């Protein structure tokens, strides 16, 4: 077995530069400019590169009793949205000089497994958490937290402007001559749909407002159940909670002999870039993952700096992109 390479230390860098260890530490940490002339900074940069020096973050945090790690607690279901969100969060957190610690849960996990997911953060020294779950444990453990997707009275949060998304989806369908509209979604979105479908001069039926089983890792035949519950009498157009439900609806509709968009127009609410590559390409609200993650990290860092500040919230309205899944209604 090859001998394990010795870790390069701060002293090694200092010896290489011919500078004191404390001065090198100041320069590397950017914590001060004590005698740190441009020439000294150049020497340290060259030494770090030549020796492939990597700071011992864990040891530094232990000495300072301060963490540079941000936790992310989020679901991981059968949609590309969460993968894209996780990648952008990692990039944004790194850009701000922090490392990230991710912990995921599945939609059909038990309460015990879900609790274990969050427990990961309570066992470590972290600066704060970005979470899809507004757990009271973060307050109990005095961990700064920002929540995505849920309005709440305890934490800062970032949400999509779901009411405006529903209104814009209805108006978009109305412009193409659709009058009878259905929805496959959950909670507030279905409630906003009920409130605004009539106000937009459109119509629906109770059986066309389908409440999804949420957070499942396995695709469910929601459209097939929707079709059976409405006795095969379908609306002109369907609004789907996300690209996952919309893609499943396209597949299920085809098996039932229903053509999209000829027989049924479809809009997806939460969507990633993949909707542009379907056949037909989906009309959808394309999420700007960089904007969402930037707002989440900004809110958390502000909360870390000002723990007693009033609660803050950010509402984001994604852009509705017209592609091929909504056409003029011939009916």
Image: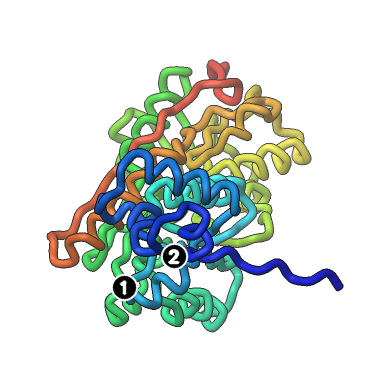
Q: Image check: 217 left or right of 192?
A: right
Q: CA distance from mark 1 to mark 2?
A: 10 Å
Q: Secondary structure at mark 2?
A: strand
Q: Residue at x 55, y 23 (%)?
A: 326
Q: Residue at x 37, y 40 (%)?
A: 39
- Position of the C terminus, as image quadrant, is top right
| Numbered tag placed on residue 71 in the rendering | 2
Image quadrant assignment for residue 254: top right
Q: Image check: 140 left or right of 331?
A: left
Q: Residue at x 53, y 66 (%)?
A: 9
Q: Residues within 10 Å of mark 1 (few under 14, many from 20)?
A: some
Q: Tell whether label 2 touches label 1 (CB within 8 Å).
A: yes
Visual colour scheme:
rainbow
Q: Residues within 10 Å of mark 2 (few under 14, many from 20)?
A: many
> Which residue is situated farthest in the front direction here?
18
Q: Image check: 227 left or right of 39?
A: right
Along the line of sight, the residue nearer the viewer: 225 or 144: 144
| Picture coordinates of residue 255, whole percent (x, y) | 78, 40
| Residue 44 seen in the figure | yes
Q: Is residue 135 above or below residue 281?
A: below
| Picture coordinates of residue 264, whole percent (x, y) | 61, 30
Residue named by callout 1: 143
| Residue 208 seen in the figure | no
């Amino acid at each position: 077995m090859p001998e394990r390479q010795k870790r390069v230390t701060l002293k090694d860098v200092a010896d290489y530069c011919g500078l004191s260890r404390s001065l090198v530490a100041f320069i590397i940490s950017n914590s001060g400019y004590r005698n740190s002339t441009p020439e000294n900074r150049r020497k340290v940069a060259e030494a770090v590169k030549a020796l492939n020096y990597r700071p011992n973050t864990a040891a530094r945090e232990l000495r300072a009793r301060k963490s540079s790690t941000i936790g992310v607690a989020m679901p991981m279901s059968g949609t590309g949205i969460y993968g894209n969100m996780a990648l952008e969060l990692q990039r944004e957190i790194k850009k701000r000089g922090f490392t990230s610690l991710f912990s995921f849960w599945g939609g059909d996990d038990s309460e015990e497994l879900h609790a274990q997911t969050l427990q990961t953060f309570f066992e470590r020294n972290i600066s704060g958490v970005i979470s899809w779950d507004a757990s009271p444990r973060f307050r109990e453990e005095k961990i700064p937290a920002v929540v995505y997707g849920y309005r709440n009275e305890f934490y800062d949060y970032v949400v999509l402007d779901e009411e405006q998304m529903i209104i814009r989806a209805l108006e978009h369908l109305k412009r193409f001559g659709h009058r009878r509209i259905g929805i496959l979604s959950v909670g507030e979105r279905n409630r906003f749909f009920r409130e605004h479908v009539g106000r937009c001069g459109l119509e629906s039926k109770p059986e066309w407002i389908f409440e999804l089983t949420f957070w499942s890792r396995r695709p469910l035949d929601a459209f097939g159940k929707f079709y059976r519950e409405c006795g095969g009498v379908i609306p002109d157009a369907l609004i789907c909670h996300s690209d996952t439900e919309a893609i499943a609806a396209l597949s299920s509709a085809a098996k039932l002999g229903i053509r999209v968009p000829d027989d049924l127009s479809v809009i997806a609410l939460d969507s990633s870039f993949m909707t542009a590559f379907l056949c037909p390409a989906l009309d959808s609200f394309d999420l700007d993952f960089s904007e969402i993650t930037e707002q989440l990290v900004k809110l958390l860092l502000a909360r870390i700096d000002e723990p007693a500040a009033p609660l803050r919230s950010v509402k984001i309205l994604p852009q509705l992109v017209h592609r091929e899944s909504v056409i003029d209604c011939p009916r």
